[in-house]
Image: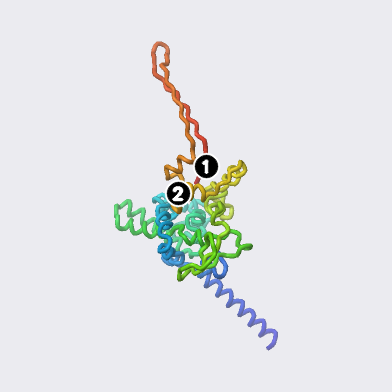
């Protein structure tokens, strides 16, 4: 075989490899991770990939607690979150000349990641069709609410609520932060407090996760401040930043999980300001009042003096997010 033929075959192999790579895009993981598969092409496909319904049989209590939390509807929220996804596009991407977004049909995964980085990190494992389907579903829900079409609104809400932060996001996909030193999360492993076998047809092993009881697990989403890794930086939650730079240096020694899971006795519910008990723990309020009859020239008027002291007892700045 001459040099020309060898060069031609090498180029052909390179082109074939490139075409294959383009045809089978993968997510943010490495081989043997849930992310490292051809990208999901619909909401249904993405939900199926991260389906954690098999966890319920053995972890009913944790599931029931989680179902009461906003983690279970991180895209829909109370409806406000879903509306904010749309607002971020209309008042954000559509206003920015270099974003490439002129209409909802132009929305890509990258345009939603400012929100989805925390509200739906697995969106990085999906195609742009999924981003567009999410926006279409949000619009469908909003129009149905305006038109008082309860059935249509409920269907759209159910679809949006199927996109959430469930067991597999915390106990698999985002269970390892230092991937070069600890490796990538394996697709057949659930990460928690111990090693061993796991009685599940899909996730057959358990492994001890180094960060599962550490605040850095929560800090992945609950923020250090501006997300400079985004092409157009955004800022939302900063709880983890103030926890690291204010609470810890002042001698604080509790983790996020201790306050929001253990001491609250809410477990996987993980409430914050929406829980009256958590709000009472976070802020110490002292109120003093006094009253006098005040003479204003010739008129006697009653007057009240109110002194309020609020002390932040949380391990981070409040309010946040």
Q: Earlier in the sequence, mark 1 or mark 2?
A: 2
Q: Where is residue 17 drawn, in percent x and y?
A: 58, 76
Q: Height in image: 253 above or below 173? A: above
Colour pattern? rainbow
Total numbered labels placed on residues in the image: 2
Q: Residue at x 51, y 70 (%)?
A: 37
Query: Disc 1 to disc 2, how far (Cα)?
Result: 16 Å
Question: Residue 246 sits in which quadrant?
Answer: top right
Residues under numbered marks 1 and 2 in contact, where contact means CB atoms less than 8 Å apart: no
* Residue 320 appears in the figure: yes
**Of helix, strand and loop, which one carries label 1?**
loop
Q: Residue at x 47, y 31 (%)?
A: 286
Q: Height in image: 105 above or below 296? A: below
- In the image, farthest residue toward the right: 3
* Residue 232 appears in the figure: no
Q: Where is residue 120 drawn, in percent x and y?
A: 48, 58
Identify which residue, 281 or 127, lies in the foreground.
281
Q: Where is residue 228 drawn, in percent x and y?
A: 59, 52
Q: Where is residue 96 drawn, in percent x and y?
A: 52, 52
Identify which residue, 226 or 317, lies in the foreground.
317
Q: Residue at x 61, y 59 (%)?
A: 178
Which numbered dot is residue 194? none
Q: Quadrant of the N terminus?
A: bottom right
Identify which residue, 149 or 203, lies in the foreground.
203
Other residues around mark 2 within 10 Å, as few (<14) / some (14–19) / many (≥20): few
- In the picture of the structure, the residue carrying the numbered disc 1 is 314
Question: Residue 19 sits in which quadrant?
Answer: bottom right
Q: Height in image: 203 above or below 145? A: below
83 relative position to 185: left or right: left
**Of helix, strand and loop, which one carries label 2?**
loop
Which numbered dot is residue 265? 2
- In the image, farthest residue toward the top: 298
């Amino acid at each position: 075989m001459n040099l020309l033929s060898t060069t031609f075959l090498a180029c052909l192999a390179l082109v074939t490899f490139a075409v294959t790579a383009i045809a089978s895009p993968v997510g943010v993981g490495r081989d043997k991770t849930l992310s490292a598969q051809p990208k999901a092409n619909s909401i249904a496909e993405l939900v199926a990939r991260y389906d954690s319904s098999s966890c319920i049989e053995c972890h009913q209590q944790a599931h029931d607690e989680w179902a009461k939390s906003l983690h279970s509807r991180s895209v829909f929220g109370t409806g406000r979150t879903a509306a904010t996804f749309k607002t971020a596009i209309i008042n954000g991407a559509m206003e920015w000349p270099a974003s490439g977004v002129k209409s909802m049909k132009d929305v890509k995964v990258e345009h939603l990641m400012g929100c989805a980085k925390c509200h739906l990190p697995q969106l990085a494992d999906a195609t742009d069709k999924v981003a567009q389907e999410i926006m279409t579903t949000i619009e469908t829900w909003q129009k149905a609410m305006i038109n008082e079409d309860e059935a249509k609104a409920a269907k759209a809400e159910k679809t949006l609520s199927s996109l959430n932060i469930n067991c597999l996001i915390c106990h698999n996909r985002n269970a390892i932060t230092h991937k070069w030193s600890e490796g990538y999360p394996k697709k057949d492993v659930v990460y928690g407090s111990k090693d061993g076998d796991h009685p599940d047809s899909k996730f057959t092993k358990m492994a001890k996760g180094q960060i599962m009881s550490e605040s850095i697990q929560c800090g992945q989403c609950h923020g250090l401040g501006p997300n400079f890794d985004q092409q157009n930086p955004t800022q939302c939650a900063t709880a983890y930043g103030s926890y690291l730079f204010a609470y810890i240096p002042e001698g604080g020694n509790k983790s996020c999980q201790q306050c929001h899971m253990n001491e609250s006795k809410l477990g996987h519910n993980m409430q914050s300001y929406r829980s009256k008990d958590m709000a009472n723990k976070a802020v110490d309020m002292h109120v003093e009042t006094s009253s006098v009859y005040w003479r204003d020239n010739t008129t006697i008027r009653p007057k009240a003096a109110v002194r309020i002291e609020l002390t932040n007892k949380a391990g981070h700045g409040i309010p946040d997010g």
